[in-house]
Amino acid sequence: MTDALARLRALQADDLPVHGGRTLAYVYDSGLPDIDRIAREAVAAAAATNGLDPTAFPSLLRMENDLVGFGLRLLDAPDTGVGTVTSGGTESVLLAVQTARDGRPDVERPAMVVPSTRHAAFDKAAHYFGVEKRVVPVGPDFRADVDATAAAVRDLGDRVVLLVASAPSYAHGVVDPVPEIAALAQARGIRCHVDACIGGWVLPYAARLGRDVPPWSFAVDGVTSVSVDLHKYGYAPKGTSLLLHRTPELRKPQFFASADWPGYTMLNSTMQSTKSGGPLAGAWAVVETLGDDGYLALSRRLFEAVDAIVAGIEAAPALSLVTRPDSSLVAFEPDGSCDAFTICDEMRERGWYVQPQMSYAGQRPSIHLSVSAGTLAHVDGFLTALTESVAAAQRTGPVTVDPGIASYIESLDPAALTDADFDGLLAASGLVGDSDGGGLALPSRMAEVNAMLDLASPAMREALLVAFLDRLTRPAHPPGRDDVPGAQPRRGQAVDSGTSRP
Ligand SMILES: *Cc1c(COP(=O)(O)O)cnc(C)c1O
């Protein structure tokens, strides 16, 4: 038993660090060891409980209502407000779209209007639920374009069931003009969802600290639902987000019941049915421990870090902000002397994870930072590493892609990408690994791969990355398995016929 735990820890040695404030995407570090310990213990204490039936585990019902209540107060909801704890931002967004669709059974071909900077979770929702998505380009300030949104709504007419705004957007960290978009929705009697997955737990405290925060919460008339992740700036362990609705009527289509089978009546508020109470308990324990005062103090540290990083970027001759951030997300880009992808690699070598963002809709590649309160203690180290990384990237110069590979990518059809195409690309780019298992030998430096992907269209990037994920997620068979009668040969291993399993 201990052996597996020891092996788990050994496997984790290759993971990005989740504490220490040096991983500036994916994880959110309060920098408070006590909070991490309390979260861990709460998750463990409730891990085996099942949120399937709130009457069987009343502790879960109580914790969910506490969290929803906290969220509703924080986001200025009226007394009619209700909500649900979901497994994450994507589930909150999926349910917001599903609920908007099912709240309008009279609409035959439902559509939603989203800014081009919305999170990709809305694309997933459109795909899953058959809701047409009309993407409206943002203005030069990267905020949703109100006039263009109004035009799209007019064009789609009665089919529109949902307008979407972000507070803030992930890629640029700016808040959309929520009052104007919500007013458009209200005038037509349709829903307006504010995706505050990443900013919803931070912006209210930023406002209390006297920072300039545009209006975006339930305080804005016409906002019907808001998503906010606890596992981001709630500093809770992974697996919790809130989907909040202005009224119970608005939430109703989100719930699902089925008594039409011989077992228990299935009654679900989310997409999951059986669900661990662990994440809920972890989030509850963190929120109860920190409380308003704790989050305010963490936000003070967070924005001290954000301001220092922004100042450092503005002072760097080769770097510039993509736009001035409204919250705790910073996007910046280098000038022509070097490239963003190489800077990311150089930062990684210095112990920092910063997230590359591909070129999109005329924007050049950039670097995303989700700053955490825990980063404050290391801001000087961050800025030193950034200066060194830029200098190193300037020495090597902008990354280039072999023209042969570039034209090969161009010749491929994303809608019909075959295993053979993908193999050809892997071979041409030197990414194929050992002969066994068709293993992918990922280079420690990703700039060349990212530059290659950056050349591809979004559709081609999707197809290539899906093919990549498919290769990554084929289990290696343990040694000796081949001796078992009837066992499949190992991938890449020649079988009698001379062929090999793909
Ligand atoms: C993170 C994020 C999401 C998706 O949340 P997950 O928890 O990753 O599923 C949705 N919208 C925004 C703006 C986000 O930042």
Image (cartoon, rainbow, N blue to C red):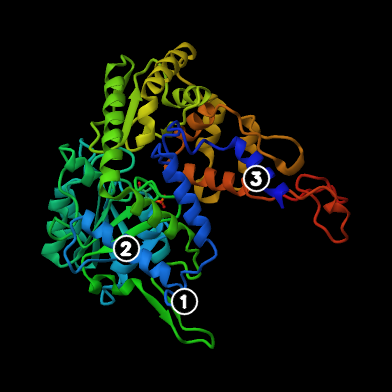
The answer to whether residue 397 is above or below residue 347 is: above
Q: Which residue is mark 3?
A: 8
How many numbered callouts? 3
Amino acid carrying label 3: it is: Leu
Q: CA distance from mark 3 to mark 2?
A: 34 Å
Q: Could you classify mark 3 by the number of other residues whose Cα lies within 10 Å: few (under 14), some (14-19), or many (20 or more)?
A: few
Q: Which residue is mark 2?
A: 66
- In percent of width and height, residue 338 lies at 41, 18
Q: Which residue is mark 1?
A: 56
Return the residue nearer the eye: 428 or 365.
Answer: 365
Image side of residue 205 versus residue 132, left or right: left
Return the residue nearer the eye: 256 or 415.
Answer: 256
Return the residue nearer the eye: 214 or 239.
Answer: 239
Indicate which label's residue lies in the foreground, 3 or 2.
2
The answer to whether residue 104 is above or below residue 122 is: below
- Sequence order check: which comes first, mark 3 or mark 2? 3
Indicate which label's residue lies in the foreground, 3 or 1.
1
Amino acid carrying label 1: it is: Ala
The answer to whether residue 125 is above or below residue 212 is: below
